[in-house]
Amino acid sequence: MKRVDMVVSVVFFLMGAWVLWQATMLPTFSVFGPGPEFMPNLAGILLLILSTILFVSSARSREPLPEGFIPDRAGVIRVALILLGLMVYTALLDVVGYLPMTFVYSLFMLLTMWRTRWYKSLLVAAAISGGLYWVFVMVLEVPAPRGILGI
Amino acid sequence: MMGFSVALTPQNLLAALLGAFLGTIVGALPGLGSSAGIAVLVPISFNYDATTALILMCGVYYGCMYGGTITSVLVNLPGESATVMTCLDGYALAKKGQAGKALGVAQIGSFIAGTLGVVVLMLIAPPLAEFALTFGPPEYFALMVLGLTALAGLGGGSPVKSLLMATFGLLLSMVGTDPVGGAARFTFNNVAFLNGIEFIPVAVGLFAIGELAVTAERTVDLSFGKFSLASMIPTIEEWKASAGAWLRGGVLGFWIGLLPGAGATIASFIAYAVEKRVSKHPERFGTGVVEGVAAPEAANNAATAGAMVPLLTLGVPGSGSTAVMLGALMIHGLRPGPLLFQQNPEFVWGLIASMYIGNIALLILNMPLVPLFTSILRLPYAVLVPVIITVSFIGVYGINNSSFDVGVMFVFGVLGYFFKKFEYPVAPLVLALVLGDLLERSLRQSLAMSQNDPSIFFTQPISATLLLIGMLSLISPLIRDMWDRRRRGASASA
């Protein structure tokens, strides 16, 4: 994890510096005790110190990347699908509404990740979205985003 | 005793059973742990009152310990990090055709240790809560620092990385309005940020989605061997051996779970190591010895009861999953800590009583239901992924009717994937996010009390002790390293 840790520690270091910079713009007024800039300053300094420690210790370590760190092609595709699908789902949820979006999303995931007939995926996707909709929106009355179709 | 009257209402009874059942499934699923399961349930349990919600989540917590055993034994895949040790001897037993025995020893041990753990919890919680009534802002601050440093030092993983994550979590908690003065911080002139970052989207994203994504990297093939219920009965020797292991694992597990920071996972590791050390035949561990299953299983269930102690009495979680529960409690308006016992006794005792019920239910249900669980686990992973993700979505959205929260969940889902891959522990971040507000308030109040003099934390005896323990737990990994190296050096030169 050596290289990874070194990069990440730099990221955290920059974050610490950024926080300290932002904290200078905060008001320092307070009736009793330290003001609103106190904790951000503290956190920023901690980040700087800790990331430096991490940088130094990872530079000196000889730890190699663990086995299987870079997943095989199929694995990369699966992860990318999950994360990208998630992004699309998040973006369109308000526009389309929970029920249709869940159906589309489930269908998409099943078609790409499940090695089976397309109509099975269709059925299961419908079952998932319908079932979840029933349980959560109808039975438990949890609020769900309604899209342009009103569902 | 009043607790039972609360716990036995139909609603709470149902919650306990449902929680235990769901927990077993979540625990059995490789890739989803107790923290993820609890995090996903938090928003869904909103509509119900705090007691029911917590009973549900608690049920999930120890249900996971039972469920993880199933996959550990049958497939050699730990369903939950606290059952990793069970794989060693459990799977070996399964290969010898004695899976039933392994499961039986594990279930019985889990039940005994879990129930005893609840008894001890019941006994020591009230006096501990009384003691904590004397706490003021400096003590609370010190306690929270202890929680974070203990989690960093004892929770496994690099302490530096854990502290980094905790600081990051603290920063996240600062987004929004300052808890003492009301100034807007880190809001970038965006109204959405003014309310701060809710902890549930972060927790669900980090725990549930992150874990899912990482598990998706390799195909998960669950093929089960056959086993019969009849082979579940251990022999007399095995009973005796197991009984010792149950007791040792249970006691050890409870105290380890009690420590803020160390939870069921660490407890199971240590219990296994100790059992091996005290055994007359340590070399047989790994080949299929019942003690190798009995000890860690007892430990992880006892640890869940132990972790509830600091959560309920002091308001400091004993583990990652209890950190999520803490957040849930705060959302329901209950502040765990000494006052909780006085102001909401029906909640506390109802919860504790439900833990007894849940343990019993799990014992009875588990053995016959194992076939049911295995068939659920046979569902292709591709089907489970959309279900879990969409359930998380609706849960998180439902908190504030806010797509912003959903966006936060997505961001932290992606981050969670990378954190898990790069081995940056996620629990400290969530804990710091949950505690951040209160921590800041305590710190600033303490300094206000002492006219900005930081020595107040060290002149107050309780606070000084807590901070000392916190510092010790931070350096303990270093000490352990040095000790190991010296021992290795000594044996090399001997």
Image: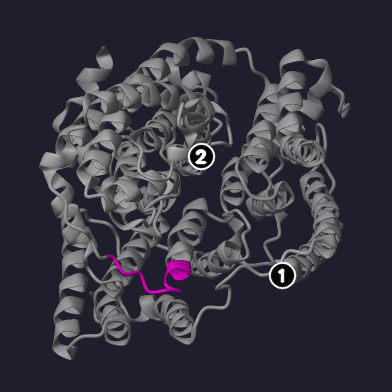
- Nearer the observer, A105 or A25: A105
Q: Is residue B14 visible?
A: yes
Q: Amino acid at mark 2?
A: Phe
Measuring 26% from the left and 49% from the top, which residue is drawn there?
B96
Task: Determine the residue located farthest toward the bottom in the rendered image.
Answer: A118
Packing grade of label 2 (10 A; few <14, some 14-19, many >=20) is many
Q: Which mark is residue B204?
A: none
Q: Quadrant of the C terminus of chain A?
A: bottom left
Chain identity of mark 1? A
Q: Secondary structure at mark 2?
A: helix
Q: Left or right: B64 with respect to B135?
A: left
Q: Quadrant of residue A62?
A: bottom right
- Per the image, the residue denoted by label 1 is A4
Front-lying residue, A16 or B425: B425
- Quadrant of the rendering where the N terminus of chain A is positioned: bottom right
| Residue of label 2 | B269
Left or right of B69 in this view: A3: right
Please tell me whether the stretch drawn in magenta is mainly helix, strand or loop. Answer: loop
Labels 1, 2: front one: 2
Give the magenta range: B213-222
What residue appears at the point 17 percent right and 48 percent down from the top-left corner? B370
User: Mark 1 is on which residue type?
Assistant: Val
Q: Position of residue B174 (x, y in %)?
A: 68, 51
Q: Chain of mark 2?
A: B
In magenta segment, residue B37? no
Q: Is residue B54 left or right of residue B167?
A: left
